[in-house]
Image: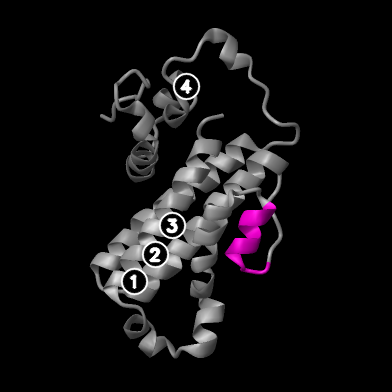
Amino acid sequence: MPQIHTGHSADSDDSNIEEIERLLEQGVSLAQSQRAVSPALSHPGRDDEDEDEEVPAGSDVQGAIGLYAEAAQDMATAGLELGLGRHFACADFCNQAVEKAAQAVSLLRFGRRTMYDHDLGTLGAAVDAPPDIQAEMATLTPFHPEAFYADTPPEEADQVISAEQAAIYVQRARRVLRWAKSIVLEM
């Protein structure tokens, strides 16, 4: 039976992504969901007065957490695709993970997804990401399938991106997810 994460362990600050991935894989039983609102949201060292912290008006906290969970799942899939040698699929899942992470921030900050034209750098600016995060996001823009396949036949996609390049894209996407995590899961 899965254990409920109480947030009291020494490494709980670093385990939110792993906890979300575990919940995605194993699920949450009804009994668990009644005892703990969300294991990924437990914050060690918080005082009772912090519980009354205001959430921005119009914010969609549940939507943001759900979309961030999808982003974390896409990152796990990107790692699997890299291991299988499917380099374009890896880059595509990195692109999707970054988009979902940024849109999770948008849901939290604005209560809605931000409209954009598949330019992840533009999306980063729209959700007030720091310039270095915007730059990381922009490097993944070319891997939206519609744009990528406009110049590359599908049968050549995996040969266009090397394993080393795909691994770099995974690292860049992870940096963006860490940034989004610091906003979405620290509410």
- Name the residue located 35 percent from the left edge and 64 percent from the top edge: 168
x, y (%) of residue 43? Answer: 45, 22
Which residue is under mark 2? 169
Vertical comparison of 109 with 131: above or below: above
Task: Tell me the element at label 4.
Answer: helix
- Disc 4 and disc 1: Cα gap in Å? 44 Å
Q: CA distance from mark 2 to mark 4?
A: 39 Å
Q: Which residue is mark 1?
A: 165
Q: Amino acid at mark 4?
A: Gln
> Mark number for residue 34?
4
Q: Which contiguous range is marked in magenta?
A: 117-126
Q: Position of residue 6 (x, y in %)?
A: 37, 20
Per the image, the residue denoted by label 3 is 173
| 151, above or below 116, in the image | below
Of marks 4 and 3, the one in the foreground: 3
Chain-order first, disc 1 or disc 3: 1
Of residue 75 and residue 70, the one placed in the foreground of this image is 75
* Residue at x 68% of width, y 22% of height: 54
| Spatial separation of the CA atoms under disc 1 and disc 3 | 12 Å
- For the residues labelled 1 and 2, the Cα–Cα distance comes to 6 Å
Decide which of tag 4 and tag 3 comes sooner along the chain: 4
| Secondary structure category for the residue under label 3 | helix
Within 10 Å of the Cα at label 3, are there few (<14), some (14-19), or many (20+) other Cα atoms? Answer: many
